[in-house]
Image: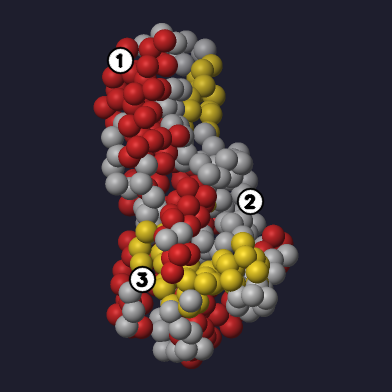
Amino acid sequence: MKTANIINVSGGKDSTATLLLAIERNTKNITPVFADTGNEHEQTYQYLDYLEQRLGLEIERVKADFSKQIARKRDLTMAKWREEKIDESIIERAISVLEPTGNPFLDLCLWKGRFPSMKARFCTEELKVLPINQFIEPMLKEYRAIYSWQGVRADESPSRAKLPEIEVEFGDIEEGKGLFNYRPILSWSATEVFEFHRKHGVEWNPLYEQGMGRVGCMPCVNCNKTELRKIARQFPDVIERLREWEEIISIASKRQSSTFFPAVTDAMVKGDDRIFYKTHGIDRIAEWALTARGGRQFDLLGDDEGSVCHSVYGLCE
Ligand code: SF4
């Protein structure tokens, strides 16, 4: 039986360099795979098309499907809400939005009734890890060994610095049988990664030229203030999409309120001098991100802290 090589491609520089390395080494049985979260920038999809054309290969695109979970939620959760005497108009509105949209990120949030967060980061598992595992599973019957190539670098984060170059998911590396994680660019710097693109005459994702430090979900739930500022300035359509998503997920949530980033609650003064509190979502956070230092700070990562997704699989750049 043969060996297969799955190259996890995100549209970012590190996974592209990993794919180029596999090609440079004349690796047999290469299958590049991209797990589409539905929260990617349009330019990333275009970049994947470019890569396919430039390298003369097909990138398999996989995406999670939550239609069954949403249907179950429509039936079971709504019955539970009725038992809990939730207002019938709230239930009707929730039912009206509880339909699969085909966008994995939005559908995942519809099912969960909330957005993922830094503390509840269920998105990587549901949108990236599981769809890729489901893609690999049938191949295990056909191949003796499968190497899952992951474009992670040690200098990206302390958790990635601890990763081994080869890791056994299951099986035996000596016998060459099983599923192994392979991280061939672990010791590379970002400069080497860009240089490797140049060496192969391959462009990198144009989002880097537009000031993005990372590509992948736009935005990631781990986004920092600097990144959000750039997104708010350069890609107002992304803010608009998040506003629409917040409206939909709010309707589907029991609390009738759900925000992409931790909610902002402002004290407001009514005409009769009474104070009340108003919750805001993406517009208020984006407005804050556009301000310089100072003023009220919100619960995003700090200005210059790294915002790398902590997935050890390197599935989100
Ligand atoms: S990039 Fe961020 S938002 Fe997207 S799946 Fe990974 S952790 Fe979640």
The quadrant where residue 231 appears: bottom left
Residue 91 appears in view: yes
User: Mark 2 touching mark 1, by CB under 8 A?
Assistant: no
**Is disc 3 placed on a helix, strand or loop?**
loop
Q: Position of residue 234 (x, y in %)?
A: 39, 59
Q: Nearer the viewer, residue 273 or 282?
A: 282
Query: Which residue type carries mark 3?
Result: Ile
Residue at x-position 57% and y-position 66%: 179
First-in-chain label (2 vs 3): 3
State the mark number for residue 158.
none
Q: Nearer the viewer, residue 225 or 181?
A: 181
Query: Which residue type carries mark 1?
Result: Ser
Residue at x-position 38% and y-position 28%: 73
State the mark number for residue 59.
3
Q: Position of residue 263 (x, y in %)?
A: 52, 34
First-in-chain label (2 vs 1): 1
Task: Give the foreground label among 3 and 1.
Answer: 3
Residue of label 2: 302
Task: Report, in whole angstroms, how far the alpha carbon at label 2 lies from the one at label 1.
Answer: 40 Å
Residue at x-position 59% and y-position 57%: 311
User: Mark 2 touching mark 3, by CB under 8 A?
Assistant: no
Q: Position of residue 177 (x, y in %)?
A: 59, 71
**Is disc 1 placed on a helix, strand or loop?**
helix
Query: Which residue type carries mark 2?
Result: Gly
Q: Is residue 163 left or right of residue 208?
A: right
Task: Give the foreground label among 2 and 1.
Answer: 1
Asked if residue 93 is positioned above or below residue 244 in the image, the reply reads above
Q: Position of residue 151 (x, y in %)?
A: 55, 71
State the mark number for residue 89.
1
Residue 281 appears in view: no
